[in-house]
Structure formats: C-alpha cells, structure tokens
Image (tube, rainbow, N blue to C red):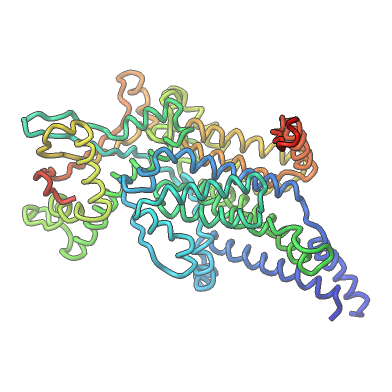
Amino acid sequence: MTPFRITKLLDPITTGLDRLAQDNHNPDVKRIVRSALMIYVIYHSSSLLPYHRFVWGDLMPAYHGHTAGGSALVWILTWSRVAAEHGLQLWVVLAQLACAGMALAGVAPRLTVPAVYVLTMNVNAMNPVILDGGNNLSQLLLFYLCFIELGGAGPAGSKRRALANSVSNCALFVAQLQVVAVYLCAGLYKVNGELWQNGMALFYIFQVDEYTHPLVHDLMLSAPWLSVIGTYFTLAFQLSFPWVVWQRGWPRRLVISAGIMLHTGIALVMGLFAFGMVMCLVYTLFLEQSTAQAICARLARVRASLPRLRVRAPADAT
Amino acid sequence: MNTTSLRRILPALAVAITALHIGMTALYLSPSSIVRRETQSLWAPYMSTLFHQNWHLFSPDPGLASTKLAVQCHWDDGASSDWIDPAEPVLSASYGGRRLLGYGKLMYIIREIPRGLQRDMVVAYNECRKQHGPADPADSANDECTLAILAADVSRHGAGAAARNFAIDVCLGVAHDRPLSAVDYKVIDFMPLKYSDRARFADEGIGWSQVIETAYPTITIVDEETPR
C-alpha cells in the first residue's frame, strides 16, 4: 500500500482526533448534567438531614458491617466512618451539601465537583444500608463528571487544552454509555426471570409492603392485567433504550419520555423517590446541544430578570 | 515529532484510556464466561474500588416476601403489650406522601434489621451443619443447630445484636417510665397472594398466601446490666 493510501485511511482518524481535541463539545449539556447531579446530591442528603443520627450516627439501628481501613484510596473515600464514630457525621453531610451548592452555582466546578465526589462517597460509606441503584449510578457519574468539567481548561490552542477537551469529551461519552449499561444489564437480567417473562412481576412486587402503595396494591389484585402491561412495558423500555437513545429526534424523545413515565411511577408508587429522581435527571446526558443551549439561555434570562440586591456605599446615600 | 503530531497523541491517549475503561466495564458486567473468568485478575482490582456496580434491579426475579420484625414488651407489673411492628409508623407516613421527604430511605434501615438477622441465622446454621453434619430427625433433641442454640450466639454480635438491641429500644420507647422485664421478638415473612388466590383478597380480606414466623428466645432485662 502506498503512503498516499495509508494517509487516506488515517484521515478519518486524524480528523476525529482533531475534532476531539479542538473543541469542548456540548458545553451546555455538560453544564446541565452538573446541575442535575448536584440537585440529586442536595435532595438526597438534605431529605435525610433531620434524621442524621438515625441514618449515619449513633442511633443507627441496623448493622452495616463495615470497618474502617484499607488502601490510601479507600481511606480517602471512607474516612467519614471514623468521623461518624465520633458523632461528626453531620459535619460530613453539611460539607457535602455546601460543596454541592457551590458546584450547582457554578463556583469553581473543577474543584467543587471532585470535592462533592469524595464527600458523597464518604457520606455513602457511613451507611451502605440506605444505598440503592440510584446512589450507585450517581457515584459513577460524579466520578466521570470530575473529568467532564476539565473541558476548556488551558490556553486556546495549547496541548493542555487539547488534552482537557479530549478527556472531557470522552468522559461525557463514557457517562452516556454508563446509563445505557444500566438499562442493558437490568433488561437482560429481567428477561431471564420467569415472573418478568410471564408478565406477573409487578403483580407480586406491588404486594411487598415497602414497594407499593395501598391503592396500587388493591388495584393490582383486582386488575392483574395491569401487571402484564406494566411488566412488558418495563421490559420493552429497558431493552430498547440502549439502541434507541442514540437516534436523534423523535425516537430519542420517545424513549426518554417513556423512561420519565416509568421512573415517575417508580418514585411515587414504589417509594423509591431518590432512585426515580436520579434516573430522570441522568437523561440530561442525552440532551442535544441546541436544546441545552436554549435551556441555559432561558435560565440566564430568568436569572437576569430577578431583582438584584443593591448595596449602597455610604457616599451614595446622600 | 511536530506539534500537530504531539497534539494528536494526547487525544489518542484519552481515547485509548476510554476504550480500556469501557472494555473493563464490559467484562465486569458481562455474564459468566471463560473470557470473564480468565481476565478476572485484570478487571476485578480495577473495577472494585471506584466502579463497583450492580444492576440486578428486581431481577432476574423480584423478592416476594414482606419481612418484618415484631416486638412484644413485658413489664415488671405483669402487663404485656400487643405485638408491635416498629416499621408501621414509618410505612404509614411513607404512604401518606413522606416518601418524598426521605421516609423511603428510612424504610431501608428498618427492613434491614430483620433481614440482617435472618441472613446471620442462615450463615450460622450452615456453619453449624458443616461442623455437626446433617440433621437427624430421629435425634432432634440432641441437635446442636437449633434456633435457640444458634440465636444465643448470633444475638451477641453483628446483625443479630442489632436486632436484639432494636427490640429492646422499641420497648423502652413504648413506656420509658415502666420497668421492663422481658422482650420477645420474632421475624415474620408475609408471602404474597398467588394470582390463582387473588379472589381471597376481595372475598375474605386475606392479603397473604402464607405467613412464616420465626420466634427468637426471650430477652430477659436485668436492670442496667443487660448486655447490649
């Protein structure tokens, strides 16, 4: 093969690498994803703040079986267990909320987002009993967000900017793949279950006290065909999401709408409010830049229209 | 090497690391296979600390039982309470809309108490059977692995101790000024109605196909010296 042909073959790759490095793609999407994750972190911790001694402190009744110790990395992510033993769990949670608030406000996100990640891992380490799939996913996405935030760092045209943009753009893609992996795995595991195959999974799930509501419990027993619809809808959604979400336009909007419907039901009916909330929030990863830009512009207009607090200097008072 | 080449190496490096991470995650999440088993020494240390994940969300089959801890209090004056479900106030509040305010998560903690106890009992039973061999129905009186014997040890540490302490706390919370003499507690599994039996709910008001109770030895309260 002549050098000219080799160069022609490598053209798409080099063009792709140049695109990856030159621009921080989807900057408004990244901004919205950061806000979404911070909203979840703030909601999750603040809803449990009134019960901090019961959830993370000395009044915690369930046995969580963890011990402090391990490698340096494990220590960085679990030092809060020692703090909780000394009654300092509230300060860990407050620090997490403070950093999340700053990250939400856009204050030094390249510093505050990693701080939120470390503090969230520590808050979660204090009581693994309360963690569910939503916490698992948010931990992973917060880690990726630390790299997503690097986009645009460094002087324009510099190698540092090239690396930062590449890492940021790759991290966004990995975060999207992570969400897809959740649905792919959950769907494939379900398909192997007899109750999911015969459409009766929801009939039995909605008889478990902590995963139901009395109205839905009675409805499911009186109209079991609803279980068949709901079960197959869940399967169809989870198995189609990994493929349809990459299609721009109405297919993506349709599958995300289905997801919002499913997770709102999970949040309100099954009591898994935090889980349902985070699953809806992570759909922001799949926003198109034009949509994200419009949302950010609208929020900026709203912020600009709010009355501003004016502080008068003493000389202005006269 | 010119600047353009160097600037392409950096994104190439980012892509390579991304591809490696995606590959490791794919292996971690993939079903059991010879490739997964043979490469476990590579992906397991990488994934376990920062990227642990489990997406068995009510799958392959959802858990069916509603597991509860029930507590009965006995006081020095001879009075006893009804069986108390400590989860009931939290569950009722959760149904009333407080699941938006963290009550759903509080339920995770309360339901973990009986489940942790059951798990510890199963582990203790299996260990005991390994040590003493299979159960002999003809000689059940000398069986070393009965609930009473195992519960005494299980309730001294871990989830067993947590369940025991929680039961005592429930009774202390019921009437703090009355001297408590003993506490009974049991784990109750409520199995759901089968599809074929669903008419029993409408006709007879029966909500469960089966109720399995596992009663644990009574806790005798010896003033402040009760080991907690």
Residue A127 in view of the camera: yes
How far across and down, in percent of the image, does residue A176 sit? 66, 52
User: Is B4 on the left or on the right of A238, as rendered?
Assistant: right
* Above or below: residue B62 compared with residue B89: below
Q: Quadrant for residue A156, please give it.
A: bottom right
- Give the residue drawn at x 43%, y 43%: B62
User: Is A46 on the left or on the right of A169, as rendered?
Assistant: left
Residue A191 in view of the camera: no
| Of the pair B214 and A79, the residue shown nearer to us | A79
* Numbered disc total: 0
- Give the residue drawn at x 43%, y 28%: A213
How far across and down, in percent of the image, does residue B18 sit? 67, 64
- Give the residue drawn at x 39%, y 35%: A210
Where is the N terminus of chain B found, in terms of image quarters? Answer: bottom right
| Of the pair A194 and A291, the residue shown nearer to us | A291
How far across and down, in percent of the image, does residue A276 sit? 54, 39
- Give the residue drawn at x 70%, y 59%: A150
| Of the pair B75 and A281, the residue shown nearer to us | B75
| Of the pair A225 and A314, the residue shown nearer to us | A314
* Above or below: residue A32 compared with residue B88: below
